[in-house]
Amino acid sequence: MITITQAPTGSLTSAGNNNYYVVKSETPFSMSAYNDFYYIADVIVTNATYPTGSQVARLVSYPDSNGYGTFDLQNIANSFVSYDFPGYITEDVLFFNTASNSSAQIQLEFGERYVYNSTFSQSYNLNSSDTIGYCNGSLSWSDQNYFDYNRLIMTPSISGSQFLTDYYSVDYNGYKDLRNWLYFYNLPPSGVLGAILTTNDGAGNVVGSYTFSNPYSSVLGVQYISVGYPQLKQLPTSSYTVLTGSVTIINPNVVTYTIQLTASGSNFVIDADSAFLVDFDGTNIVDAGVTTNYNYLEDYDSIYLTDYDGATLITDGLVSNIAISNPITFTVMNNCGKFRDTSVAIYWLSKLGGFESVLMNKMNVYTKSKVIAQYLKNNVKTNSSGRIVQRAYDMGLTNFYTQITNNIKFNSDFVSDAQAEWIAGMFQSPVIFVQTHDGVIQAANVVEDTYEVYKQANKKLNSVSLTLELGQNDYSQRL
C-alpha cells in the first residue's frame, strides 16, 4: 500500500509550478531483509497528441531518511504543452477557438520495487493520483505561494473567473490596428457555453448587445476568444445573435465594448416593461428589474420569469445564462499616440500561458550588430615564370561570412503603473512576436538585461522603452 501525502490540489495547475508529489509505502523497507527499495511513478498524459491518455514516462525515486519518495514533474509537464499563437492566421474568422497545445491533463500511478530475502519484487498501480489539468504557465516564486489556479477555471461555481492574462485590470486599450485575444480554461460540463458583448457610446449609453455560442463548450482545456477591434469588425454576422442595436458590432458610434463569458448561450429577452425573477415557489423574489440583456444568478433551482404584475408567465426553467468571467472593457483608440505610421504590434506569451498584445512606437534608434567568421587565406601565388607574386588586392585574413542582427528600439504611450507592470511580462517572456504594418510577423527577443520605466511622477504616468532583437538574421555570401 502506498499513501500519497502531497499532490497538486484543485482542477488546474501550471506546467512550471507546484508539481511535487510525495508518497510513502507501508512496506518495511528499512529492515535489513529489504534491499534496493525505490518508488515507481507511471506518468499518464492526456493532450492533443494522446487524446485518450498514454503513459509517457516511468519515474523512480529512492526514499529519503524518513521513507518518503518525491517526484517533481516540472520538466515532464513542460514537455507536453506548448503555446497557441493565432497571429499566424491572416484573419480571425471565429470568435471562439481552441488552444489544444496550451494545456494537458496528468495523472500518476504509483508502485514500488525491492529485493526481499534475495527475491525481486515489483508492484504497479498501488495507488493513483487524481487527474489534474495544467496550462503552459510559470509563476514567480512569490506568486505561486498564494496564487489560486482555481480562479482560472471558467465555471458557474466560481464567481468572477479570471482569464489567462497578466493584466489584472478590466480596462484595455482597444487600438484599431491591434488584434487581441483572451485565453481561458474551460471545464465541461458546466463551463463556457457562450459570451455576451455590449457596445457603448461616449456617454456610456448602450449601442448594441450581442451573444455568441461556444461550439467547443464540451472541449476540456485552454480556449481563446478573438476580441480585438479589427477582429470584431470582420466577424461574419452569422457568428452571433443580435439582442439590441445594429447588425454590425463595430460602427462609428462605438467608443467602448465589454465582454463577459457566460454559462449559457440564451438570454431572457422580453417586452420593455419591468419584470420580476422569482423562485419556483413564487414567493421569494431573487432579483428585480428589466431583464433584457441581463444575467441572473442566485441559486440553481428552477425559476419562473413573470411579468411585473406577477400574473403572466413568460418562461420557466433553470437560469443558466450566467456571467462567469470578470467583465473586460476595451476603449477604442485610433492609433498609438501621434505616431501611427511607426506603431508596431507586439505579442508575447504571458506567465499564465495566453498571449498579450500591445502597440508600441518604433523610435529613431535602429542598430545592426555584426558577427564575422574569418579564416587565414594563403595568398601566395606564382606567375607563368615560376616566380612568387604577392598582389595588394589579394586577401590574407578573409571573411568567410558575415551575420547581421537587427535591433529596433520601441517606446510605449504613457501608461499607468499597472500597465507598466503588465508590459514587464514581455521582458521575461520566452516567446515574443513583432508584426509590422505589412502583416509580416517575426520572432524577437528583448535585448536589455534590466527593465526600465520612465516616470512623470507629478502626472502618475510612465513610459516603457525596450529594444527587441529580431529573430531572423541576415547573412552575406560565403567565400
Image: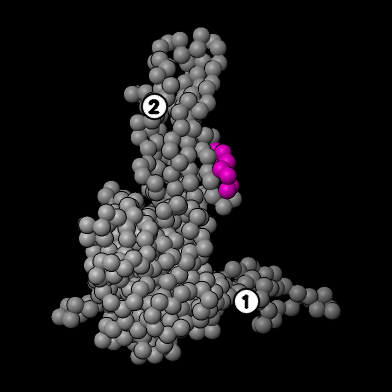
Which of discs 1 and 2 lies nearer the camera? The answer is 2
Residue annotated with mark 2: 3
Residue annotated with mark 1: 476
Q: Which residues are magenta?
A: 50-57
Looking at the image, residue 86 lies above or below residue 73? below
Looking at the image, residue 472 lies above or below residue 251? above
Q: Residues within 10 Å of mark 2 (few under 14, many from 20)?
A: some
Question: Could you tell me how far apart the alpha carbons at marks 1 and 2 are, in whole angstroms?
Answer: 62 Å
The residue lying at 31 percent from left, 78 percent from top is: 272
Queried whether the magenta region covers residue 51, the answer comes back as: yes
Amino acid type for the residue under numbered disc 1: Ser
Per the rendering, the mark at residue 464 is none
Q: Is residue 405 left or right of residue 271?
A: right
Q: Is residue 147 left or right of residue 381?
A: left
Secondary structure, mark 2, is strand
Q: Quadrant of the N terminus?
A: top left
Amino acid type for the residue under numbered disc 2: Thr
Foreground: 212 or 41?
212
Q: Residues within 10 Å of mark 1 (few under 14, many from 20)?
A: few
Q: Quadrant of the C terminus?
A: bottom right
Residue 274 location, quadrant: bottom left
Secondary structure, mark 1, is loop
Percent of width and height locating residue 110: 47, 30
Percent of width and height locating residue 279: 27, 57
Q: Are marks 1 and 2 in contact (CB under 8 Å)?
A: no
Residue 362 location, quadrant: bottom left
Percent of width and height locating residue 254: 36, 85
Is residue 345 visible to us here? no
